[in-house]
Image: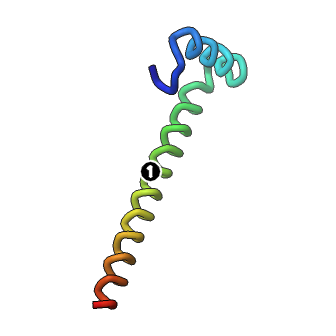
Amino acid sequence: MLGGMGGWEWGIVLVIVIIVFGVGKLPEVGGAMGKAIREFRDASAKDDDNVETETETKSESKA
């Protein structure tokens, strides 16, 4: 399973999240988490592109 967690562990996590945030806020929390993950991936991809571009530029200037 994902992260070494089985069904019981995910169930316990879900119950804790419901207790902390309440049922009404779950869609809002889920949306915020999804947006944060998406922004992190986009930023990571941009960093990877910048590193590759810098590496290519340095290789071309040495030649």
Q: Residue at x 59, y 14 (%)?
A: 9
The residue lying toward the viewer, choosing from 60 and 24, is 60
Q: Residues within 10 Å of mark 1 (few under 14, many from 20)?
A: few
Amino acid at dot 1: Arg
Q: Secondary structure at mark 1?
A: helix
Q: Position of residue 35 (x, y in %)?
A: 49, 44
Q: Position of residue 34 (x, y in %)?
A: 49, 38
Q: Residue at x 35, y 70 (%)?
A: 52
The residue lying toward the viewer, choosing from 38 and 53, is 53
Is the residue 18 above or below the residue 31 in the image? above
* Quadrant (top left, top right, bottom left, bottom right) of the N terminus: top left
Q: Position of residue 6 (x, y in %)?
A: 51, 14
Q: Position of residue 36 (x, y in %)?
A: 53, 45
Q: Which residue, given by chain and number where applicable, does mark 1 sit on? A: 41
Q: Residue at x 29, y 86 (%)?
A: 60
Farthest residue, direction front: 63
* Quadrant (top left, top right, bottom left, bottom right) of the C terminus: bottom left
Is the residue 60 above or below the residue 28 in the image? below
Q: Residue at x 58, y 25 (%)?
A: 26
Is the residue 31 above or below the residue 58 in the image? above
